[in-house]
Image (cartoon, rainbow, N blue to C red):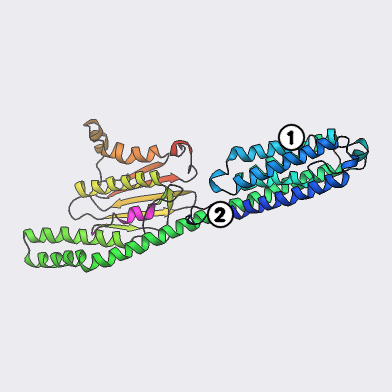
Amino acid sequence: MTGVDPLRRDPATPLWWGTIALRIVTLVFAAGTVAGHATGYARPWLAWTVIGVMAGWTVVTSLLYARQGLRWAGLVVADVVVTCALMLTSPWVLSPAQYAAFHPLITTVWAAVAPIAAGVRFGAVGGVLAGLVVAVATGFARQGVDLDVARDGVLLTASGLLIGLTATTARRSQAALAQAMRTEAATAERERLARSIHDSVLQVLARVRRRGAEIGGEAAELARLAGEQEIALRSLVSTEPAGTSSGDTADLRAALQVQATSRVQVSSPAGEVRLPAHVVTELAAAVREALTNVEQHAGPDARAWVLLEDLGDEVVVTVRDDGPGIPDGRLADAAEQGHLGVTKSIRGRVAALGGTISLETAPGAGTEWEMRVSKRGVGARNGRFPRRD
C-alpha cells in the first residue's frame, strides 16, 4: 500500500487485516479440533478433506482481502456460500454419538469469519444478512434448532452488525476528512489569489472609480462600472469556495454571494448551505435571471436584495427590489409575445427542481420572488426533487 493516497485508501483496511488474522487463527483451532476427535468421526477422511478445503479457501481469501482492489463484492458473497457449504457437510462427518454430545460442527468458529467480512464490505445490513444466512446453515447442520443454535445465530448477526457499523463509520469519517481537506486547500488558494488581486486588480479598479467620479461626464459611467466590478471581485475572493464534493454537492451560499454588486446585497447564513450541485446551479441561475430583470426593467437607481434561508428541511431564496413593480397582466403579455425569461428561466427552473415559487408585486411597490426547494429529494432518481403541490 506504499505510495497510495491516504484519502483514497479504504479506511476499513485494518478491519480486513483483522478478518484475515481471525480466519487463520480459527483455521488452526478447527484443525486442532479435528485432530483431537478424528477417531470419533463417522468419516475421518471427509473431515480432513473439509479442513483442507478450509485451508485453501483461507489462503485465497487472505491474498485477495489483503489487496484493496481485489475485495470484490462477489468474492465476499462467495465466502458466505463456501462457508455454509462446508458447514453443511457436518451430518456426513460427525457420528450420532458426537451429535448427541453437542460436538462442534466441522467448521467450528471458522464459520464466524464470513459474516464479519460481509460487514466490512457491505456495512451493517450486509453483515446482518450474512450472519442470518450462516445461522440458518448452522440450524440445518445441527439438524434442529436449540438454545445453542439460537445463541450462535445471535452472535453471528451481532458480529456482522458491529463490524458493519464500524466500517461504515470509518468510511464516512474519511469522506468528511477528504471534503475538509479539499475545502482547506481551496480556501488557501483563494486567499493567495485574494492577496495578489488586492495588490493589483482591486487597487486599479478603486483608482478608476475615484478618478472617474472626479472627472465626471462619460468617465463617471466608467467609474460606476469599475465600482460594481470592484464589489463583485471583492465578494468573489472573500467567499468560501463553492466546489463540489465527493457526493456531488455544492454550496448555495457561495454561489449566491458572488452575485453581489453595488446595487445587489446578498444575505445568507454564516455556514455552508450544501445541496446537490445541479440544484445549486439551477437556483443560482434563477436568481441571476431575477436580478437581470431588475437591472433591465426596474430603473438605474433600483436596488435588490437576495436573502438565503436554510430551514432544515428546505431552503428559501428571496429576491426583492425597490423598483416600480410589475403591472397586472404584464407577465402574461410577455409570454404571449415570446418573452419567456420569467416563465422558463425563473419559474421553470424552480418547478424542475420540484420546488414552489411565488411572486408579490404591485405598481410602485417593487417585486419580490420567493423560491422554496425541499431537501427531502436529495439523492432522488435522476438527481431531481419530488414534485410538490
State the mark number for residue 85. Answer: 1
User: Which contiguous range is marked in magenta?
Assistant: 251-262
- Indicate which disc, 2 or 1, sits on the residue closer to the N terminus: 2
> Measuring 63% from the left and 53% from the top, which residue is drawn there?
17
> Please, what secondary structure does the residue beneath circle 1 have?
helix
Residues at circles 2 and 1 in contact by the CB criterion of under 8 Å: no
Regarding residue 198, the answer to whether it shows in the image is: yes
Question: Is residue 254 inside the magenta stretch?
Answer: yes
Taking 179 as reference, is 195 above or below it?
below
- Residue at image position (20%, 66%) is 200
Q: Is residue 359 a member of the stretch shown in magenta?
A: no
**Residue type for callout 1:** Ala
Of tags 2 and 1, the one toward the viewer is 1
Residue at the farthest front position: 45
Q: Which residue is mark 2?
A: 11
Q: Residue at x 77, y 38 (%)?
A: 50
Q: From the viewer's perspective, is 290 left or right of 140?
A: left
The answer to whether 180 is drawn above or below residue 107 in the figure is below
Q: In the visual, does 175 lie left or right of 309? A: right
The residue nearer to you, when weighing 71 against 261, is 71
